[in-house]
Image: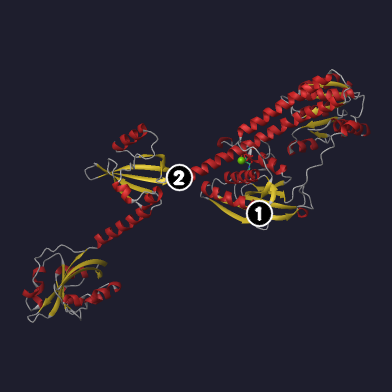
Amino acid sequence: MNPAQPHPKQDADSLPAVPASALVSWADSLELAVLFEPGANRVLEVNRAFARKFGQPGPAWVGHDMAALIHPEDAEEWTQAFPRLARPPFHIAREHRWQTAQGWRWIAWEETAVRDAEGEVCAVRSIGRDVTKHRLAEEHFRKLAQAVEQAPVSIVLTTPGGTPQYVNSRFTEVTGFTLEEIFEGQIPLLRDGHPSEAAYRHFCALVASGKKWSGELCSKRKNGTEAWELVQVSPIRNHLDEITYLLCMREDISERKALEDQLRQAQKMESLGTLAGGIAHDFNNIISIIRGFTELSLILPPGDPRLARYLGSVHAAAVRAASLVSQILAFSRKTEVAYRAVQVNDQVRELAGLFSETFPRNIEQCYQLDDSIEAFAADPDQIRQVLMNLCVNARDAMPEGGTLTIATSRVAGQTLSGLKVDPAQDYAHIRVSDTGMGMAPEVRARIFEPFFTTKQEHGGTGLGLAVVYGIVANHHGVIDLESTPGSGTVFHVYIPLKVRANPPVANPGDWVKSQLPAGTERVLLVDDEAPIQEMLGAALSDAGYRVVSAQDGTEAIQHILTVDAHVDVVVLDLNMPRMSGLDVLKVMRARSPEVPVLVITGNLTPLVQAELVAMGHTAILEKPFDLVAFGRALREVIAAQAKG
Ligand code: ADP
Ligand code: MG
């Protein structure tokens, strides 16, 4: 940096031989002036400005070593330049750090050799200015420029008309355009990505009026691929308040967009899980109808007119099943739910990426994965769903932050005492724990219930854990938890490492040989599904029972309250509108405890089961069942009652 020279350049040859006079014209100057002996660096004279700057009166400087004032890092360079002063033009300009009264300062010196009559250099005259402020500003500017250049967002400066003036390297990297293409070609940098001409005009008008614009644009890269960007354009004004440039910053959010899509798909899966639960219930009814009527039809004597009616019911049930299936298919394009080899650790790792992008920063994630777990047969989408739902709940439980830990390990069934596991089987143990709010016992008792949520205001669906429960049960696994209010929750999921073989399929001819066991009792048959009513009623009548039907709980109660004396046994469906089977059972227990009850249900949740057991009721038959099993179960409850 060459400071301006306010004084006429001195012709070195015309300078007087007596060095002392060399500073005369700088005596009152604001510039620092010093005269010193070359080589020894001894000060000969300083002006007032120098004395002030370096904090000692002028005369005190005489004989002082100049080199003692320079910054140690600059000293060598300073000394090495002196030989150049002995050669024309006998002049150098440079900047170094010096120890002044205000501390280290950058000083720009103009140094000239002062020569005697023989032309020998007898002194060095240095005229200097403090350029510290300037240096710092420059430094600051350099850092700023570096930051802009290396910023992870694309930064573009254009004229108000959109002609590019500057782009940083991120911009060229993301778009694939070269600098020539950008500055010489006619690439409409600001137009790019706006969905329509009208949208672009709106943008231009807004920016021209001095306002900031921001939005998400999908722009085309040079190679033709599309990229989603979060774009912000703001005007830059000069001191006259005129808009001189537009500053455009673009952040690549393609990845975030992809994650959003993934989450949407995941939510769809969650709803699918619930839907599947409801559908399973419907299907169990349909299967009961088809099986029952088929069994009835097969034992009808040839030519019996009831055959056509029974087959009509089978057909109607099949049509209903088909429509249910098409509903599921319409809901999710993924049709096959396939058991495949699932490596749970890989799934956890995959989700970890998603969580670190989407979970709040105040939630620390911790993974303890045991890689000795072998792959097990499972539906990968469903296992992912389990992990996802548990982790999302853990996140929700830590609004103030905390630690989410996912751990996997392999455990032997025999070590899991107190859980309904096969002791001969090894299990994959997946542990999801949080350091969040935990659960009160009354919440904990209900969490697996569909639609139970404590997050009403936050849009909780209450389906997460119901889905988890269903999936784990489908995989013959078990789920367990520990929760302490105020300090956190741990969910344990155990999935068998070898899937159990499916229960043996009954020989299709079996039922013919064994007929529904006969009886003469009066049966109150309570089921809201008319075909099931009809089917069970017909089967019971055929076997000799006398059948009284009730379409729902209220009707059943009416029967019990008015004509209970005539009922020997009750067959009770649990899942009914208005008054549930459980409520009917309570009334019956109070009113006529001696009447035996066979509960039939297509959806036996652990909660309902617990409630039944609490009432001392254990005669439960799960749908779908075949008629022979039904008949046997009925005889069993009657016999048990007679004994008790
Ligand atoms: P949702 O999350 O939509 O409320 P879920 O079935 O996922 O439904 O969970 C049901 C309820 O269980 C939650 O509303 C919450 O009260 C409780 N819960 C689930 N997981 C946790 C957890 N990790 N910590 C505390 N409470 C939890
Ligand atoms: Mg949830």
Q: Which numbered tag is attached to residue 253?
A: 2
Residue 103 visible within the image: no
**Residue at position x 74%, y 50% in the image:** 498
Residue 338 position in % (x across, y down): 68, 42
The CB of the residue at mark 1 lies under 8 Å from ligand 1: no
**Mark 2: few/some/many CA within 10 Å (<14, 14-19, 20+):** some
**Residue at position x 41%, y 45% in the image:** 221
Place residue 556 in its image quadrant.
top right
- The quarter of the image that holds ligand 1 is top right
Front residue of 344/138: it is: 344
The C terminus is located in which quarter?
top right
User: In the rendered image of this protein, does residue 275 appear above or below residue 149?
Assistant: above
**Residue at position x 90%, y 34% in the image:** 640
Extreme residue in the top direction: 305
Front residue of 442/605: it is: 605
**Mark 1: few/some/many CA within 10 Å (<14, 14-19, 20+):** many
Drawn side of residue 540 relative to residue 180, left or right? right
- Report the residue marked by disc 1: 408
Chain-order first, disc 2 or disc 1:
2
Drawn side of residue 173 relative to residue 573, left or right? left
Drawn side of residue 329 relative to residue 253, left or right? right
Residue 83 visible within the image: yes
Disc 2 and disc 1: Cα gap in Å?
33 Å
- Badge 2 element: loop
- Marks 2 and 1 close (CB-CB < 8 Å): no
Q: Please identify, in this view, whether the residue under mark 2 or under mark 1 is nearer the observer.
A: 2
User: In the rendered image of this protein, does residue 279 appear above or below residue 559?
Assistant: below
The N terminus is located in which quarter?
bottom left
Tell me the kind of residue under disc 2. Ile
